[in-house]
Image (tube, rainbow, N blue to C red):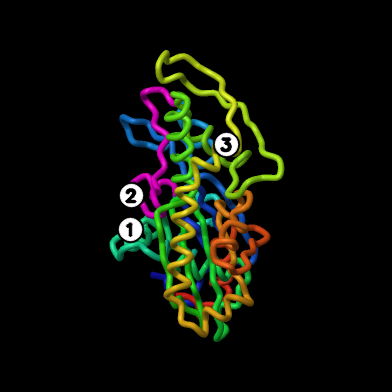
Amino acid sequence: MIKRLPGIFSLSNAIGIDLGTANTLVYLKDRGVVLREPSVVAIHNETRKPIAVGLDAKMMLGRTPGTISALRPMKDGVIADFEISEHMLRYFIGKVAKKNFFTHLNVVVAVPYGITAVEKRAVMDSAFRAGADEVHPIAEPIASALGVGLPVGEPAASMIVDIGGGTTEVAVLSLGDIVYARSIRVGGDELDTSIINYVKRAYNLIIGERTAEEIKMKIGSAVPLEQEMTLEIKGRDAMSGLPKPLYLTSQEVREALMENFNAIIEAVRTSLERCPPELASDLVDRGIALAGGGSLIRGIDKLLSDATGIPVFGGDDPLCAVVNGTGVILQDTRWRGH
């Protein structure tokens, strides 16, 4: 009871969380981003007890014995495994915020725009069970727009395209709120899956998630490159079952990813078509901002600009856009509830 009486004995910790499909980032008020780790938990299969969380657990993906499973409790931006996500949140919160009887923990957590009320409740319940005293959900498009510095509060249009691990969020904002938004379940994970499927289909080679992610980051592109690249990869031959090397080109990776890129283009075009004319005219001058890890793929800005005829630009730190936005919200409470 004492810690819940404002101003009496209580010490306040305020943190912002970007609970992403691929990575979880935590912002500590007055200190900035203090944690960035993969959203992975390794558990013992019999006891269901966690044995590693974050980076240590990611190193185990695809390499565990039968007694251990390395799991990703987030899927498509929402909680897929409630128990494991709670373990993960508790671990991350414990690393950055000291909690005791006299501490009041205030958490702002970003959630995808398109999730259901049940999915949003699951995120909030996980945060409460992990030790939070107050939980304020915030729509990811608003958080990412604030994080890249867009003037969201002005009576003019701002547009954000946040390509995350599980979803791509496209939103037009004005006067501090969302005018129109779309959330599609296409993100970094879907790009990795497309690469895995292409390599298996074209070469009968089976590769894992980590190899696919490496391919995407090293030679992935959305438009033809001045100098195309080649990368040596290793996997397991689907016919013989033996390890096998392979050289993959950036043209092939681009072909594998094009269906996903087209889905993102369609989401952006639809958002522009649903935008009121006055706001649409603002975007011709202001352009479209990119955020999220997917925005780091070479040429994605040019692809979207060519498809829409509107300038597209990326932020300085797109991976931290959402969590930096939660930091803005921690400082300015008028944004809570959006």
Relative to residue 185, is residue 234 drawn left or right?
right
Q: Amino acid at mark 2?
A: Phe
| Tag of residue 215 | 3
Q: Quadrant of the N terminus?
A: bottom left
Q: Is residue 220 above or below residue 319?
A: above
The first of marks 1 and 3 along the sequence is 1
Residue at label 2?
Answer: 82
Residue at label 1?
Answer: 122
Q: Are marks 1 and 2 in contact (CB under 8 Å)?
A: yes
Residue at (63, 49) in percent of width and height: 298
Q: Amino acid at mark 3?
A: Ile
Task: Examine the rendering and report whether any part of residue 5 can be seen.
Answer: no
Q: Alpha-carbon neighbours of circle 1 within 10 Å: few (<14), some, or many (≥20)?
A: some
Task: Examine the rendering and report whether any part of residue 36 can be seen.
Answer: yes
Spatial CA distance of label 1 from label 3 is 33 Å
Q: Is residue 235 magenta?
A: no
